[in-house]
Image (cartoon, grey):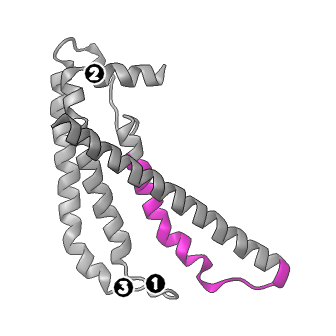
Amino acid sequence: MTTLLRWLDEAAGFLCRWTLYLTLTLTFLILSINVALRYAAGTSLAWASELPELMFPWMIMAGVVLAAQHGSHIAVVLLTQKLGVSRRWVLGAGSLMVAAMYASLAWTTLPLLEVAADERTPILAVPGSVSVGCLMAGFALLAMVTLTRLPAVWSGSADTSHEEAQA
């Protein structure tokens, strides 16, 4: 079971890292080429502002999932630091609630896919469901990552690794 959870967590991290690499690289290249065309030829690519705008939500959600994997996304430790042994149970219960909320957010975006599919971007005619799908995938990955970290939270090993990472 732990091997499966570790594999899912690593797969989510791999997917999000490559999403970041790809979106950041393409955004930089597209905007650089467009700026060079404006200065050199006095013209620009019509789609050069639309494509980075479509990639931006994917970049953000990938970063949010990676932050959650490293314990940097949502962390309120002021009260939990005061707890003794019960800290891991409080953190575990909190993780379950956070995972449930992310899962419910992913579920509630499902009907929006159909609504957003009718909206198209002006130049590339990409359906709006691409951005909504990004949100849904991001919320689902956040729920999954939170659940894959739960055994480490309950055992108490997640607390020490997070504190060591901050030190």
The residue that disc 3 covers is 119
**First of labels 2, 1 by sequence position:** 1
Res 65 label? none
Residue identifier under label 1: 121
On screen, residue 41 versus residue 142, left or right, reads right
Q: Secondary structure at mark 2?
A: helix
Give the residues in magenta: 40-65
Label 3 packing within 10 angstroms: few (<14), some (14-19), many (20+): few
Q: Tell which residue pokes out farthest to the right in this image.
A: 40
Query: Is there any visible trace of residue 79 in the rendered image?
Result: no
- Please report whichever mark, 2 or 3, sits nearer to the chain's N-terminal start: 3
Q: Name the secondary structure under disc 1.
A: loop
Task: Measuring from the top left, give residue 2's x and y in whole percent.
Answer: 19, 35
> Whole-percent x and y of residue 92?
18, 30
Q: Does the image show residue 140?
A: yes
Instruction: Work out whether 156 lies above or below 39.
Output: above
Q: Amino acid at mark 1?
A: Thr
The disc placed on residue 157 is 2
Q: Badge 2: few (under 14), some or many (20 or more) residues near its Cα, within 10 Å?
A: few
State yes or no: discs 2 and 3 in contact (Cβ < 8 Å).
Answer: no
- Residue 104 x/y as whole percent: 17, 56
Q: Residue furthest front?
A: 3
